[in-house]
Image (spheres, rainbow, N blue to C red):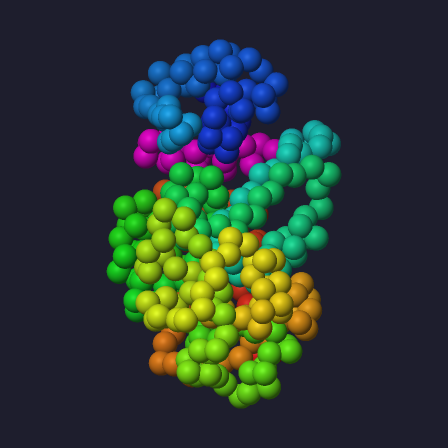
Amino acid sequence: MTLQQLKYVIEVARSRSISKAAQNLFISQPSLSNALKELENELGIVMFIRTNKGITMTPEGVEFLGYARQVVEQADLLENRYAGAQSTQQHFSVSSQHYAFAVSAFVRLLKNYDREEYEFSLRETKTYEIIEDVKNLHSEIGILYLNDFNEKVISKFLREGNLLFHELFTATPHVFISSGNPLAKQEYVTLNDLLPYPYLSFEQGDYNSFYFSEEILSTISRPKNIHVSDRATLFNLLIGLNGYTISTGVISRELNGSDIVSVPLHVDEEIRVGYITHKNVKNSPLANIYIEYLKDTIVEEQALL
């Protein structure tokens, strides 16, 4: 087993494709395949399975990847400390529901990351895809919420994927609306108050079940509904159409300015927001730093509510 082989495993897991990984590693595809096969034979395990959708990892491969990342990171630190070499390009990925605090924490991480090279990824996406990303090690961290309505279903998917949920905070529901909306000055709003306004929600694709909805109270019938796929569009429609969406109330004023405000929603509900990780993989140093930035950002934004 060589350090280079460990780097090959990490890149294939990240790229989800032998051919893409070979391009990124500047080696031929047959050479990469042979190196991986030799490593699997040496260890007596199968790490990768080829499917029509690309490469997936076996449970043994997932466990090995966790150790490989730790070894490569430590080797990089040793080389940088004692050989005076530049550290290799670092990779870090997060998948998240559409939370501004997740973006703010990501911005902090990058601003304080003093390296010449890196490849980071922040993917705001559908609930099911967040779970799949972390399950398949395409992302180290996934950010989503649980509540009384969806917890049984979401927890089942987490257990099946060997994933753990770590709570960050508990929130009461708020609505995000334009600062020019007639409801913006109210102390709180009710569901009846919201009836005249368009309701905005994030589409969930093939898993468009109430349980995977990014917004609580998804089973309530509303006269005006608009589905969007990204946060920028949602915010534009909140302003342009005086629409509303339901979320945690934590909004980044630094990133979003004062055009969008958060108003408490008068309902007897709670939202438990947290992050998911893979049970068999130890957090990288970057993941731990990002988690701390998440916690700091949430505390700061909640203080402004």
The percent position of residue 193, horizontal first and vertical second, equals 46, 83
Residue 39: name its quadrant.
top left
Give the side of residue 197 with respect to residue 252, left or right.
left
Give the side of residue 269 with respect to residue 68, left or right.
left
Residue 176 seen in render: yes
The percent position of residue 1, horizontal first and vertical second, equals 45, 20
Q: Is residue 64 magenta?
A: yes
Total tally of numbered discs in the picture: 0
Image: 93 above or below 169 = above
The percent position of residue 37, horizontal first and vertical second, equals 40, 16
> Who's the residue at 69% across and 37% down the image?
117
Q: Nearer the viewer, residue 232 or 127?
A: 232
Q: Is residue 67 magenta?
A: yes
> Who's the residue at 33% across and 31% down the image?
58
Question: Which residues fall within the magenta stretch?
Answer: 58-77
> Who's the residue at 35% across and 50% down the image?
207
- Residue reaching furthest bottom? 187
Q: Nearer the viewer, residue 302 or 125?
A: 125
Residue 115: name its quadrant.
top right
Q: Quadrant of the C terminus?
A: bottom right
Q: Nearer the viewer, residue 282 or 234?
A: 234
Residue 6 seen in render: no
> Who's the residue at 27% across and 53% down the image?
156
Q: Nearer the viewer, residue 211 or 168?
A: 211
The percent position of residue 42, horizontal first and vertical second, equals 37, 17
**Type of secondary structure dominating the magenta stretch:** helix
Image: 104 above or below 281 = below
